[in-house]
Amino acid sequence: MSIITSKNANIKDLIERVNKDREPITVVDDKGSGAVVMSIEDFESMSETIYLLSSKANAKWIYESIKEADDNQTKSFNFEDLEKMIDEH
């Protein structure tokens, strides 16, 4: 993450840079206070991840799913099979 001082910050350039580089930039003032500038896409992705992992049950399900995928324990379904499964619930 890059760090720049607020007196050197040009908001238009910062927006272009975080969107191009996909890396947040920390902007600090002369008193040491600061803020982080990041792309909207990265912010939304981070917010969604935090939301999904905020439920212990959901986090457990996600981690178990990742482990199954890593261990090649995935199952394939065609569209019709998925429709049947949905209709049964």
Image: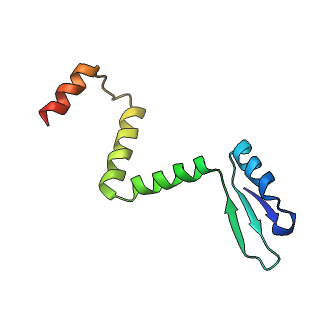
Q: Nearer the viewer, residue 41 or 49?
A: 41
Residue farthest to the bottom, as pictured: 31
Instruction: State which quarter of the image contains the N terminus.
Output: bottom right
Q: Locate residue 21: give its quadrant.
A: top right
Q: Position of residue 3 (x, y in %)?
A: 78, 61
Q: Position of residue 29 (x, y in %)?
A: 79, 73
How many numbered discs sit on the rendered protein?
0
> Which residue is rendered at x = 33% and y = 28% of the image?
74
> Which residue is rendered at x = 81% and y = 68% of the image?
6
Q: Position of residue 23 (x, y in %)?
A: 69, 49
**Does residue 74 sit above or below 31 in this rendering?**
above
Residue farthest to the front, as pictured: 12
- Using residue 69 as the reference point, say whether residue 33 is left or right of it: right
Q: Position of residue 80 (x, y in %)?
A: 23, 20
Q: Nearer the viewer, residue 44 or 11?
A: 11
> Which residue is rendered at x = 76% and y = 48% of the image?
17
**Does residue 11 sit above or below 28 in this rendering?**
above
- Using residue 35 as the reference point, say whether residue 82 is left or right of it: left
> Which residue is rendered at x = 32% and y = 46% of the image?
61
